[in-house]
Amino acid sequence: MDLEHAMRAAVRGTVAFDAGARALMTMDASNYRRVPLGVVAPRDADDVAAALAVCREYGVPVVPRGGGTSIAGQATGVGVVLDFTRHMRAIEHIDPQARTAVVQPGVVLDDLRAAAARHGLTFGPDPSTHSRCTLGGMIGNNACGSHSVAWGTTADNVRELEVLTYGGERAVLGRGLPGPLHDRTAAFADERLALLRTGFPDLPRRISGYALDRLLPEHGRDLARAFTGSEGTLGVLTRATVRLVEPPAARALAVLGYRDESAAADAAPLLLPLRPLTVEGMAADLVGSSAQESLPRGAAWLFVEVGGDTAAEARARASELCRHAAADGALDHAVLTEPAEQRALWRIREDAAGTATRMPDGTEAWPGWEDCAVPPTRLGAYLREFRALLGEHGLRGSPYGHFGDGCVHVRIDFDLLTPAGIARFRRFSEETAGLVVAHGGSLSGEHGDGQARAELLPKMYGPELVALFAVFKELWDPAGGMNPGMLVRPDPMDTNLRFDVLPSRASHPVDVEFTYPGDGGDFTAAVRRCVGVGKCRTSATTSPGGDSVMCPSYRVTGEERHSTRGRARLLHEMLAGEIIQDGWRSAEVRDALDLCLSCKGCRSDCPVEVDMATYKAEFLHHHYAGRPRPRSHYSMGWLPVWLRAAAPYARALNALARGPLAGLAKRAAGLAPERDLPALADEPFRRWWNRRTTGGRTTGGGTAVGPMAGGRATVGPMTQRRATVVLWPDTFTNHLSPQVGQAAVKVLEAAGLRVVVPPKAVCCGLTWVSTGQLDRARTVMRRTVDALAPALDAGLPIVVLEPSCGAALRADLPELLGSDDPRAARLAASVRTFAQVLEELAPGWAPPRLDRPVVGQTHCHQHAVLGDGAERRLRERAGLTGSLAGGCCGLAGNFGFERGHHDVSVACAEEQLLPAVRQAPAGAAVLADGFSCRTQLAHLAGTPGRHLAELLAEALPDA
């Protein structure tokens, strides 16, 4: 189109008008969807000016966009989206003496905080999306965060802003600075002094509307403050000078328990005179039962952080605060000073924006009435009336938020799929707006008005002041090109809903292979899980509460389409059929999923448990149905068959794999030429096991490879009868790492367990699942269930040494076979890791002491599906010190072997795994329970990784 050609000619940055790029930008973290014409990622302010000039010429609107985590719809647009996360993300200068920083709009908040921390400083506002939100987005929304009771909102921390208007005017905004725009706005304010002085409520969290009162002379005519929170409707930010603050040297977290959320809300303002850093509140209906075990007694809690010059001072202040709280109704309290303990609890709070999207019974909940604020002294009364209003409308929600500032977040189980449900959404929003205003509050206390609340602004400000908002916007944007439909002349709150375009399950069900048990078998509902909070867009592999895996491909490429959210957006648009019109055959979706490692990290790290590995397998199944697949699908997908056939010729094939024909073989198989082919074992594990068996008995007292009988096993603490376990001979252990299986047998028997092995070759089907060959995977899985039927009937635990196979048996197998065969669920429930079975069935066994450090990486599937708590405890009992890295090794089964994936695979390993190994202390053991992790270490570091079973077996007395 002419617009695209003109933009490419004018802009040096990235210009994308293709279907995939547009699909990625249709939504933010709200209920809304608007389809842009194209996406431009400018390189600098001159690029922004050039893009605006082209848009003016063609009469096309513009919406600036940061991390896309806005919850009111203001980061969606119908014209050109300016994406600042690609190029304009530099921290230009930090002045420790002046305590300021100069940043470009695409700077991620955590990056600024890390840079400022080197000078003993930080940026005060810290929304829960701090790992991926940008400074430009924070300024656009006037973001706040949990520390606003101490350091204020973003607007309170802005010094100067450099902006460009839609008309091309450049301006530097601040307090009383010269310039035509300052002159126009000063005259605008002077003509309306009385209205500006009386029309705005005095609230710490007044985010709704334009902050026109900041233009008053008594407020220094602070145009930067008035621009902050304008949601991209006035101009485009190109540079910001922001204030930095000095955080306390030490912090302590006081967690206070109350009988209910209203009691907690009533108590919150009573704590403010003690100068806390945070006063956050949440109730039991948002906290899982396991998390509640780590909290003090109560049905609602305040998280109150205090600081001090020393840890002792911080603890003393927290203890004093707890004494005050007890006098004001707190039932119980706890004081945490260890950073790890504090991070674990903060993760509960920070994930609430995602976890709140599912009610305890699995019902979907949505933003819409997301973040109002009332005077803190009115919060308890407001919450009681709000809960009553929910009940009157037959709705449910779980309020939480910044109780010290009177700001409440909530996701509500609105039905946004039917006309009746949408009508109720509107009625409830209108009535709740009246309730907030009756309590002297603001419709928005953090996330802005966007499309969700701007229509209701006359209830809060009255028609005269709202009309003045339109006059103010006209001063900046007479052409109406900046983010139309927001704040001024807003689109109605019940239009542009992102669910409108999705197929109805009743009239247009999506035929799928997996059962999607958490979504009632509805693939559309599974895709709807992604609410856009963007936790997958973080560049770090650590998070509050521990290491994380999600999303390795995004961390390598930095591209939205390679994030879990981006892929979910493309699947959403594939189902909608408006932008992406070829359904399961979509090349855009296929290309975005190509770099998905199927690590399953999102299944555990995403607050709403999006499982992109399953979605990818589903997509590949349909995409290649009835047509040729990539060659690697035949080579890697059918790996168990090829390895079984190759086993008798292992030595000859190993020699060929190291010879000149290896390159041809890899090319024919669609494998990366950079990869060495793994060596086949001379003696597979099963052959070793059979050889070890004599006359129906093993030298260690186990059974032969006959039917798995011999009485029921104990599955709790050991009784006098020896417990029996089934050792799963997975493909990788059997044909490529038999020494791992042999070591496991030795350790399990040393622990007093009786080991049996399935009489027939069994397979979890993982390689067929990961390549989307789901019909074949289902056949393999059914055979496996049949082969294990005697073990299941006997109640025997299945010990799986390869984490990826354990995860497939635990998750993929029951979700693919469904409820038709109840044995599938029984098999999944019987799966144990090596450490888990030792902990459960041999709790009195003392492992050999190794007393040495370890390095390595927790397998991503173990992290996501199986958990590694038992492994951590077993390592500690064995004297293995140190922690394993987070992230993903990057090989990820077939992924790192496939042609075209090598560079991404290596980059993933370079995040944490390879640096950890290079920096390992002397004598450290390199621990890697997964075959992929060990292979990656061998290929890239020349270091042999070991399974935990191997380390323990070598240290046994008779080793």
Image: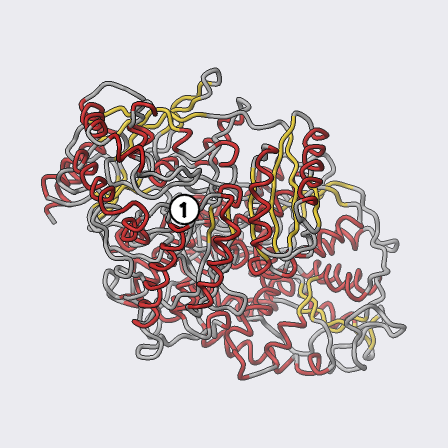
* Residue 744 x/y as whole percent: 75, 61
Q: Residue at x 80, y 61 (%)?
A: 746
Q: Residue 20: x percent and y percent? A: 28, 54
Q: Nearer the viewer, residue 197 or 656?
A: 197
Indicate whether 783 appears above or below 184: below
| Three-letter amino acid code at the position of disc 1 | Gly
Q: Secondary structure at mark 1?
A: loop
259 displayed left or right of 377: right
Image quarter (top left, top right, bottom left or bottom right) of the C terminus: bottom right
Q: Which residue is mark 1?
A: 441
Q: How is the image coloured?
A: secondary structure
Relative depth, front residue between 656 and 298: 298
Residue plotted at (49% across, 27% down): 115
Which residue shows up at 35% across the image and 77% down it? 509
Q: Say which residue appears at 69% left-offset and 66% top-offset.
A: 832
Which percent across, then down, holds residue 142? 38, 38
Frontmost residue, 385 versus 9: 385
Q: Is residue 395 above or below residue 265?
A: below
Whether residue 629 is visible here, answered yes or no, is yes
Q: Is residue 771 visible?
A: no
